Amino acid sequence: MSEFDNGVILVTGAASGIGAAVATRLASDGAKKLILCDCNEDLLRDFAFSLPCERQMLVGDVSDERLWASADLTGLTHAVVNAGIATGGTIDSLAFADWRRVMAVNLDGAFLTLQAAMRAIAAAGRGGAIVVTASVSGIKAEPGVGAYGASKAGVLQLARIAAKEGAASRIRVNAIAPGGVETPIWRDVPEIREMIEEKGEDAVFKAMAQMATPLGRFARPEEIAEQIAFLLSDRAAFMTGACLVSDGGYSL
Ligand code: NAI
């Protein structure tokens, strides 16, 4: 028997990066059905097509209450609360609109996703597991990540509270806090996008990793997906409210 046999699993931010890697991992591990949520419809359609299991697409913005009011999450067993965006800028320079945009997707979106997932898993009555994608930026203070870091610190605490609230319904909730991961999210930060366009992704990821990550590299999305799959699975049956830091030593 595979690890996620009969699993009905929601993944947000499923069209790219970590979300796509998690969806691929869960589909290859016997998930019965994946509910794939993303605001990038074209990317999501192309990606979903490649998966060897039943798929349901949920196209829209995770921070929009109407998306969740109309979502069919019947029979849900697991969820990966993962959609997110980034921005850069010190507090004295950050536009309030950028702060609000990041908070809306990363924190409001995580709240609404968690709420919908916890309700659906509780209604199905079989218990289940949820993983929230936080970030080491929510743990380690660095200049220039005020909005992103604060949103991820919020998400981390939300996951811990959800773990305590969900326990009575046998819902485990854990967080993962990756360091740098090789995904397109880095292009959300204008200075990094410019560097990538000039020098290429590999060179920029390598240079950034060598500045502050003891292992000297960023993670591949598949590595983080593997750890999310572990937290979702029964191998982590006694873990709830935990934060798995996976950052090559960056936060040390
Ligand atoms: P990504 O940019 O490859 O994927 C993010 C996905 O979320 C995209 O498909 C995008 O269309 C979707 N998305 C964005 N806003 C959305 C919204 N409002 N509603 C629905 N979908 C939306 O980025 P990545 O790296 O895979 O990010 C996934 C999560 O991992 C994010 O929460 C991010 O903050 C977190 N993370 C990423 C790290 C990295 O270095 N790549 C490090 C630590 C955490």
Image (cartoon, rainbow, N blue to C red):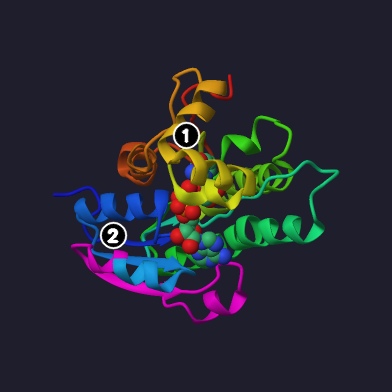
Q: Is-magenta flag for residue 51?
A: yes
* Mark 2: amino acid: Gly
> Percent x, y for residue 83?
51, 57
Crowding at mark 2 (Cα within 10 Å: few <14, some 14-19, many 20+):
many
Magenta residues span 47-75
Mark 1 or mark 2: which comes first in sequence?
A: 2
* Quadrant of res 15: bottom left
* Quadrant of res 50: bottom left
Q: Is-magenta flag for residue 79?
A: no
Q: Name the residue under label 1.
A: 205
* Quadrant of res 12: bottom left
For residue 111, above or below residue 246:
below
Name the residue at the right extreme: 92
User: On the rendered structure, is 60 left or right of 146?
Assistant: left
Front one among 102 and 34: 102
* Mark number displayed over residue 7: 2
Mark 2 secondary-structure assignment: loop
Name the residue at the front extreme: 198
The answer, for residue 163, to whether it is visible in the render is no
User: On the rendered structure, is 148 left or right of 170?
Assistant: right
User: On the rendered structure, is 22 left or right of 5?
Assistant: right
Front one among 235 and 190: 190
Crowding at mark 1 (Cα within 10 Å: few <14, some 14-19, many 20+):
many
Front one among 217 and 18: 217
Q: Which residue is drawn at 45% across and 21% down?
A: 216
* Mark 1: amino acid: Phe
